[in-house]
Amino acid sequence: EAGVAQSPRYKIIEKRQSVAFWCNPISGHATLYWYQQILGQGPKLLIQFQNNGVVDDSQLPKDRFSAERLKGVDSTLKIQPAKLEDSAVYLCASTAQYTGELFFGEGSRLTVL
Amino acid sequence: GESVGLHLPTLSVQEGDNSIINCAYSNSASDYFIWYKQESGKGPQFIIDIRSNMDKRQGQRVTVLLNKTVKHLSLQIAATQPGDSAVYFCAESKSELGGTSYGKLTFGQGTILTVHP
């Protein structure tokens, strides 16, 4: 079974530039999450999708972050404009509906200079 | 807001020893707890979970203990191996209608486990 795929693995940008990350969850997983992991900290939930709808985006900084999952499969997370404090690993995760195990991708590491 | 935290940021053990990683949580409404292992450059990997109606659960070489009275969670790794070296996170969540909360986790800061051969 293929895991959660993310790209790019690494991205370096200057502040005020924009960046987008892509995620393809495990086939059949209806629920998709984006987490932000700052160096030395545990992951922090940004947004949760159920199929193509947003379930919870209460912790997403909506002035600069946006995310979509238009067809209920792949998802993109965008940051515009980026700030220095956005430097982090952005982790995508998915879970089958009503089961407990969350599967993470390897993450996209963002460095903002 | 409420969060999950760890007592020890680093733990160093010899190969073959047993390891114990501790975690304190503050949200008394949490009813689902999970331990994750994260190796450098990789995403967190599920190790074991436990629900609040249990106080102990065992897996292969790992045991999770939950003490709801003092809001404490621990992960025991038996016969620790060099391949166990990683950062270990505890995480918590609470049930929501429709079962949509399993992936809505609050993570602790992590404990670095180093296993010496």
Image (cartoon, coloured by chain):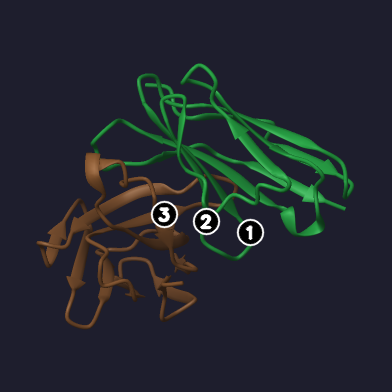
Is circle 1 on the same chain as circle 2? yes
Q: Secondary structure at mark 2?
A: strand
- Residue at image x 30%, y 41%? B100
Local crowd at mark 2 within 10 Å, few (<14), some, or many (≥20)? some
Q: Badges 2 and 3: C-beta atoms under 8 Å apart?
A: no
Separation of residues labelled 2 and 3 (CA atoms): 16 Å
- Residue at image x 59%, y 49%? A60
Q: Badges 1 and 2: C-beta atoms under 8 Å apart?
A: yes
Residue B24, how many percent across, how many down? 34, 77
- Residue named by callout 2: A44
- Residue named by callout 1: A38
Q: Depth check: B83 or A33 in front?
A: A33
Residue A81 appearing in the image: yes
On screen, residue A3 versus residue B42, left or right, reads left
Amino acid type, residue under disc 3 in the picture = Lys
Q: Earlier in the sequence, mark 1 or mark 2?
A: 1
